[in-house]
């Protein structure tokens, strides 16, 4: 798939996801629209504040830190990030594989934004995930699980694939997710009260759109060799299983990988692929993503 084709899919998915989020939380976008290819939108927080006490009732351990956690401490805005194409292949005319990396949320205000003004012009396309993703796929899994076919598949071009980053929870937070100290109940309530109406379905829809059959063909496009669910100490693995269950086996041909958070500054220590694996055939310039006419 070429970058321009993939970006169109991401733009359409982001528009639908943000529209659904806005309607669900009764949000209003703030100021001039962020360029679609940035995959982000800035929202006014008043509507978020008004939802306090309207989502759940009772008691759970831990402080009730939402929605304050998803409001910028200086500008007092909320920032949602959808599906983002990593900047390494933006504008590329090469026909490349697509690897989808699915996490819990994209980043934190404190480590990315130094002033209130910066939230109005976000560009999240430098995902900083490729080094740790390469280590996960090539360093940990290739020899043991794939017979070194990943290296052969990706040896064709540099960079060897488009990387799409997307998350089950759309909001940028003030702190890293693990620092929020949410137990499983609190995390479920946060996802339910402040996030997408159906996180797993939104992600499954995106994977399905990218890996869908091309019009006029009977063969799978076979353009997503890996969907990587990254995050070990959060709801990602459980939501991943739900996402996989929503995908019809005949509609998407891919390998599912579970690993540690690819956004952290140290190498993952967990890297697991579900069996059976989907065989990876080496791609040549003449056979790239070849499909069969009906």
Image (cartoon, helix red, strand yellow):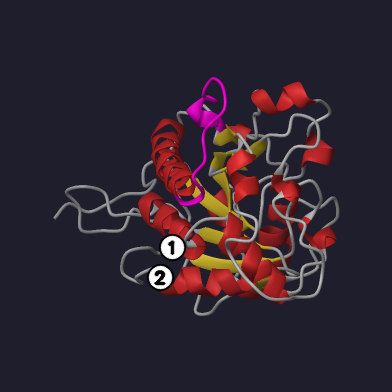
Along the line of sight, the residue nearer the viewer: 255 or 80:
80
**Residue displayed at 40% across by 50% down:** 210
Secondary structure beneath label 2: helix
Closer to the eye: label 2 or 1: 1
Question: Which numbered disc flags the more N-terminal residue, 2 or 1?
Answer: 1
Q: Crowding at label 1, few (<14), some or many (≥20) Cα neighbours within 10 Å?
A: some
Quarter the N terminus occupies? top left
Q: Report whether residue 246 is seen.
A: yes
**Residue displayed at 61% across by 34% down:** 44
Q: Quote the CA–CA distance across marks 2 and 1.
A: 7 Å
* Rendering coords of residue 189 (x, y %): 63, 67
Confirm whether the magenta stretch covers residue 131. no
Q: Viewed as shown, does residue 144 lie left or right of 24?
A: right
| Principal secondary structure, stretch drawn in magenta | loop
Q: Which disc is residue 246 wearing?
A: 2
* Rendering coords of residue 286 (x, y %): 37, 42
Q: Which disc is residue 201 wearing?
A: 1
Q: Is residue 158 above or below residue 246?
A: above
* Rendering coords of residue 234 (x, y %): 71, 68
* Residue 114: quarter of image: top right
Q: Which residues are magenta?
A: 24-38
**Residue displayed at 57% across by 27% down:** 30
Q: Report whether residue 156 is seen.
A: no
Q: Viewed as shown, does residue 66 lie left or right of 275?
A: right
Q: Viewed as shown, does residue 216 lie left or right of 17?
A: left
Along the line of sight, the residue nearer the viewer: 282 or 211:
211
């Amino acid at each position: 798939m070429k970058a321009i084709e993939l970006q169109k899919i991401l733009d359409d998915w982001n528009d639908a996801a943000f529209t659904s989020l806005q309607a669900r939380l009764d949000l209003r976008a703030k100021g001039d629209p962020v360029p679609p290819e940035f995959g982000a939108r800035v929202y006014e927080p008043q509507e978020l504040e008004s939802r306090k006490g309207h989502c759940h009732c009772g008691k759970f351990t831990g402080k009730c830190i939402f929605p304050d956690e998803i409001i910028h401490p200086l500008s007092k805005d909320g920032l949602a990030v959808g599906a983002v194409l990593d900047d390494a292949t933006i504008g590329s005319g090469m026909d490349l594989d697509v690897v989808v990396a699915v996490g819990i949320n994209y980043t934190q205000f404190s480590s990315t934004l130094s002033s209130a003004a910066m939230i109005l012009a976000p560009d999240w396309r430098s995902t900083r995930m490729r080094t740790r993703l390469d280590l996960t796929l090539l360093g940990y899994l290739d020899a043991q699980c794939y017979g070194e076919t990943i290296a052969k598949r990706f040896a064709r071009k540099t960079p060897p694939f488009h990387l799409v980053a997307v998350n089950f929870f759309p909001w940028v937070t003030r702190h890293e997710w693990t620092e929020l100290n949410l137990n499983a109940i609190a995390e479920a309530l946060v996802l339910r009260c402040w996030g997408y109406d159906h996180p797993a379905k939104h992600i499954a829809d995106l994977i399905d759109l990218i890996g869908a059959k091309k019009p006029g063909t009977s063969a799978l496009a076979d353009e997503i060799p890996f969907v990587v669910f990254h995050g070990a100490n959060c709801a990602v693995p459980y939501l991943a299983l739900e996402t996989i269950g929503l995908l019809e086996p005949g509609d998407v041909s891919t390998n599912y990988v579970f690993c540690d958070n690819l956004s952290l500054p140290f190498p993952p220590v967990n890297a697991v692929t579900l069996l059976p694996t989907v065989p990876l055939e080496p791609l040549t310039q003449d056979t790239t993503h070849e499909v069969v006419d009906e």
